[in-house]
Image (spheres, rainbow, N blue to C red):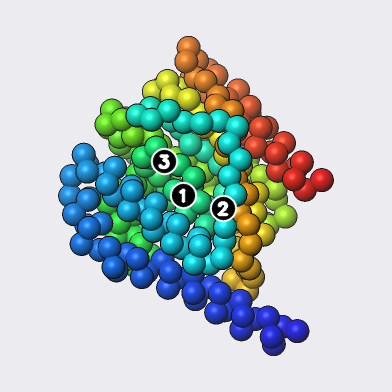
Amino acid sequence: MKIVTYPLFLVYRVWFYILIAVPILVLFPFLLLSTLKQSWYPTFFKLARIWAGFILYGMGLIPSIKREATYQKNKSYMFVANHTSMTDIMLMLYVTKNPFVFVGKKELSKIPLFGFFYKRTCILVDRKNPRSRREVFESAQKRLNQGLSICIFPEGGVPDQESVVLDSFKDGAFRLAIEHQIDIAPMVFFDNKKHFSYTFFSGSPGKLRVKTLALIATKGKTLDNKRELNQLTRAAILQELEQSLA
């Protein structure tokens, strides 16, 4: 059976990387132009959403969105979601119309083509550098002052074991949300791991269900509340994931 399935999985994975590269190459002049000034970032974001949709539909991964919360135009949020797949980035872009900036690990900037724009537009975290945390907060402040939102996957990475439903959350997203008094906007990605996990010889087309959960307010909260907000957000996402598995 593996003789049949492994080549199909290989083709599916290679096709994914082709879909990543092709629109970047086609849109390269426009993408590059839109990154020359930070004030032009919303244009880059619109192009990134086109890129994300191209990849998802090209892979046969069809988003199905259930909205418990809607987002106001021209308002900043802290977008958070569970992290299980490379497609999480594309799905977050597809679901969210409010321009946001990813906070992500510096290592992704080494990916050809993708990494070129990743390091020009995202807030990079170097976990080996203690100063990086302070730089992240300063960069986030600038972006929020421009009216943008921030997106963080608070697990800090994809769990090593795929059997883990939801890993523990780091405090960074909640600290930022409190410091800037912006609402936390949790989302649940139900099917990304099922259809495109980090196991190379796996994957299949299918529906990607997303649910935007009720906003969690930070107004009046202090840094003493960051752990409380961390646990509240994680519990809301975990409950949805466990119900979907029941």
Q: Nearer the viewer, residue 141 or 190?
A: 190
Q: Residue at x 29, y 60 (%)?
A: 116
Q: In x, y percent, where is residue 33?
A: 18, 54
Marks 1/2 in contact by CB < 8 Å: the verdict is yes
Q: Residue at x 29, y 42 (%)?
A: 42
Marks 3/2 in contact by CB < 8 Å: the verdict is no
Q: In x, y percent, where is residue 152?
A: 47, 41
Residue 37 in the image: above or below residue 14: above
> Which residue, given by chain and number where applicable, does mark 2 sit on?
63
Q: In x, y percent, where is residue 149?
A: 38, 34
Point out the tag, 3 or 2, that comes first from the N-terminus.
2
Q: Nearer the viewer, residue 75 or 88?
A: 75
> Which residue, given by chain and number where applicable, does mark 3 sit on?
97
Number of callouts: 3
Structural crowding at the residue carrying mark 3, measured as other residues with C-alpha within 10 Å and reported as few (<14), some (14–19) or many (≥20): some
Q: Give residue 94's mark.
A: 1
Element carrying mark 1: helix
Q: Is residue 84 visible?
A: no
Q: In x, y percent, where is residue 83?
A: 57, 49
Q: Quadrant of the N terminus?
A: bottom right
Q: CA distance from mark 1 to mark 2?
A: 8 Å
Q: Amino acid at mark 3?
A: Lys
Q: Residue at x 39, y 58 (%)?
A: 51
Q: Nearer the viewer, residue 177 or 146?
A: 146
Element carrying mark 3: loop
Point out the tag, 1 or 2, that comes first from the N-terminus.
2
